Image (spheres, rainbow, N blue to C red):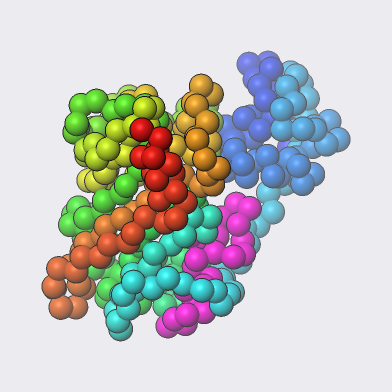
Amino acid sequence: MTALRVEPAAAGTRLDRWVTDLFPELSRARAQGLIAGGHVRVDGGPRKPAHRLRAGELVEIEIPPPPPETLVPEAAALTIVHEDDHVLVLDKPAGLVVHPGAGHSRGTLAAALLAHAPGIAGVGGPRRPGIVHRLDKDTSGLLVVAKTRAAYDSLVDQLARRAVTRAYLAVVHGRVRPDAGIVDKPIGRHPHDRVKMAVRPAGRGKRAVTRYRVLERFDDLTLIEARLETGRTHQIRVHMASLGHPVAGDPVYGGRRRRPLPVPFEGLALHAAALAFLHPVTGELREFTAPLPPRIDRLLSHLRNSR
């Protein structure tokens, strides 16, 4: 239990912001969960995350221990593109969380992988077995999973050396000009919203490079291919939004003035369509593709038929 008096300089600060400033290892969502769960009290009573602190208030904070670093296998259908004794390549559907996190302790891809291939339990982190890179919950497409420690080390090294090729297809707002470009802008945690990422000044974010090219233009939407040279969180979403062309269906980086899509749509219009890496054992270049899911196909069909 930590008990602290609010300093005059912190008066007027939101309670959840004050807690995350005090404990930088906590995300804003985690702090809000602690407050809502009664683990943070102000002058002995509960408050809302948006409570504005006053100088002299006594804030008591109790941070429960993290959940045990164990993962329970959960059998679930997997779309397997390739599998051998060393690697597994999957086509992940939109809506599926890759590994456990805040608000997502069950029903993850990691738990399904553990049920499918129990031997990966000791590969990588205990709550993300075999997973060397991830996709956002609402992004679909290709993921490679390591089934052995040697394969894991090899793939992690290839990612660090930018030897893994990843190409995405995305429908973005607006008519993108020019026909191709490179976004080379650092990405880091958003300065005012810890659940978001943002383009940051030099020295305050990690280098992030995205190459894109236009495949097809519509009235107010554009189909692009984006290739990652780095692998920062939300990289394509942040970079395209920084150009004024957020990914369609993105509630986080889409902006308040984005136009609604012409058809009902769930998830992000973002799909990891191609993946290539050197096989960890044979050294052979392996290349895989995954077709667009029906939700994005329907959107594109509507746009093409509306011309």
Magenta segment range? 97-119
Q: Residue at x 49, y 76 (%)?
A: 114
The answer to whether residue 21 is left or right of residue 162 is: right
The answer to whether residue 21 is left or right of residue 271 is: right
Q: Residue at x 39, y 40 (%)?
A: 305
Counting from the top left corner in percent of width and height, residue 205 is at: 34, 33
Residue 224 visible to the viewer: yes
Counting from the top left corner in percent of width and height, residue 283 is at: 13, 73
Q: How many marks?
A: 0
Counting from the top left corner in percent of width and height, residue 223 is at: 32, 39
| Foreground pick, 243 / 131 | 243
Q: Residue at x 69, y 54 (%)?
A: 64
Counting from the top left corner in percent of width and height, residue 245 is at: 37, 29
Q: Quadrant of the C terminus?
A: top left
The answer to whether residue 64 is left or right of residue 248 is: right
| Foreground pick, 275 / 146 | 275
Q: Quadrant of residue 214?
A: top left
Magenta region includes residue 117: yes
| Foreground pick, 245 / 25 | 245
Magenta region includes residue 300: no
**In the rendered view, would you say 23 is above or below 140?**
above
Q: Residue at x 30, y 81 (%)?
A: 84
**In the rendered view, would you say 62 is above or below 159?**
above
Q: Quadrant of residue 247?
A: top left
The residue most toward the right is: 45
| Foreground pick, 186 / 244 | 244
